[in-house]
Image (spheres, rainbow, N blue to C red):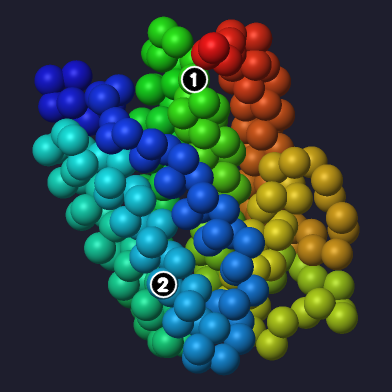
Amino acid sequence: MDLDLLSDTLPTHCLRYLFFALLAFIVFAPLNTGDLGPRLIYLVLTLVMLAAAVRMAWLQPWARLIVIVLAIPAAFAAAADAAKIKSEIIPVLMIFTIALFVYLTVRILHKIINDQVVTAETLFGAACIYLLMGIVWALLYSLLSRIQPQTLFYSEPLRPADIVAAWPGYLFFSFSTLATVGYGDITAGTELARSVAILEIIAGVFYLALLIGRLIDLYRPRS
């Protein structure tokens, strides 16, 4: 593209850095429901993840601008969440966050599909896409819950005091759906949520079957 928005030129090892930043963001999600200290730690992990996203686009001016513009509202949304601030603007900031992760997903997908040689960095990119898919759908469930509080149905022992703030629950449900595990302790509570969950299942199955299968078939470790 003339504006190099999907350029395959990325900084060295940026995808593996992004992968570990995303993994930490997901694994330590329960910190976001604790006291102020744990929430601040999780906010730092979120900012590290956003920094890794900016670094991935750093070599292309237009791509860098897009990621920075989308990452700033995402950082404000994370800060508001850590401070437990209730505001009508939070859903708008979440839309910017979703747009950022979707752009990263498309950019990484474009790169790994067009790689002539499949390397370890290519596989890190494929893993990043899977994690990004789970996070994007978790954000969608969180956004829907602000419109319809009954979007997700929790079994009674798990039911959080504030459904809208139950970020670990959204992540858990999203990745359970993406992996088609379906534990049943958190389920879709509305028809719209069920439709979104079906789309996530389809995306997860197609991604694993088509893209990951192709990468495994083409990957040859370098001597």
Q: Which is nearer the eye, 66 or 196?
A: 66
For residue 84, side relative to residue 152 (left or right): left
Give the residue drawn at x 70%, y 59%: 172
- Taking the view exactly as shown, the residue that stands out farthest to the front is 223
For disc 1, the marked residue is: 119
Residue type at numbered disc 1:
Thr
Name the spot of residue 193 as percent of width and height, x first.
66, 54
Q: Quadrant of residue 48?
A: bottom left
Q: Quadrant of residue 69?
A: bottom left
For disc 2, the marked residue is: 44
Residue type at numbered disc 2:
Val
Q: Which mark is residue 149?
A: none
Give the residue drawn at x 79%, y 71%: 154
Label 2 vs 1, first from the N-terminus? 2
Give the residue drawn at x 43%, y 46%: 17
Element marked by disc 2: helix
Circles 2 and 1, Cβ within 8 Å, touching? The answer is no
Name the spot of residue 35 as percent of width and height, x first.
57, 91
Name the spot of residue 156 as percent of width and height, x first.
86, 79
* Visible residue check, residue 48: yes
Front position among marks 2 and 1: 1
Q: CA distance from mark 2 to mark 1?
A: 30 Å
Element marked by disc 1: loop
Q: Quadrant of the C terminus?
A: top right
Label total for image: 2
Q: Which is nearer the eye, 144 or 17?
A: 17
Q: Which is nearer the eye, 209 or 58?
A: 58
Name the spot of residue 20 as percent of width and height, x first.
51, 50
Give the residue drawn at x 42%, y 52%: 98
